[in-house]
Amino acid sequence: MYKPIDIDREKLTLMGVKFSDLKSLESTANAIGSNMFEGYEPTVKGIEIIRDYILGKITIGELIEFTKKKAYV
């Protein structure tokens, strides 16, 4: 079942996770929303990991490792 997530465009937060700009917030929210239709249930940790990947703070290899370890839970 689809469940809305908290997006605050003024504070630039997604489920309480702070973003540096509106563009990265919205692109992350769109990606997460699309995946939610496939059954993904976002967590704060998962959003932090996705944000860090989008911002280049972690590599694709690190993202894959986090996924394998289910660090997003």
Image (cartoon, rainbow, N blue to C red):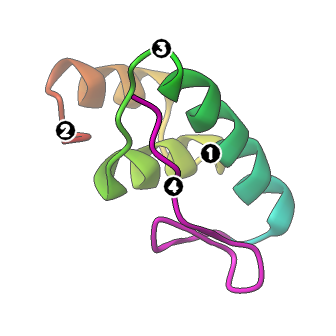
Dot in front, 2 or 3: 3
At a point 46% along the width and 74% down the height, the residue shown is 16
Residue 68 placement, left or right of 64: left
Residue 17, position in %: x, y?
48, 69
Name the residue tied to disc 3.
Answer: 38
| Residue closest to the eye, 49 or 10 | 10
Helix, strand or loop: magenta stretch: loop
- Residue 2 among those drawn in magenta: yes
Considering only vertical position in the picture, is 71 above or below 69?
Answer: below
Name the residue tied to disc 4.
Answer: 5
Q: Tell me, yes or no, whether the two marked residues, 4 and 2, touch with CB atoms within 8 Å.
A: no
- Residue 10 among those drawn in magenta: yes
SS for callout 1: loop
Residue 22, position in %: x, y?
82, 66
Name the residue tied to disc 1.
Answer: 56
Q: Tell me, yes or no, whether the two marked residues, 1 and 4, touch with CB atoms within 8 Å.
A: no
Q: CA distance from mark 2 to mark 3?
A: 19 Å
Residue 57 placement, left or right of 66: right
Toward which corner of the image does residue 33 lie, by quadrant? top right
| Three-letter amino acid code at the position of disc 4 | Ile
Farthest residue to the left: give it.
69
SS for callout 2: loop
Name the residue tied to disc 2.
Answer: 71
Q: CA distance from mark 1 to mark 3?
A: 25 Å
Farthest residue to the front: give it.
1
The disc label shown at residue 31, or none:
none
SS for callout 4: loop
Q: Please give the range of residues in magenta.
A: 1-19
Task: Looking at the image, tell me whether mark 4 or mark 2 is earlier in sequence order.
Answer: 4
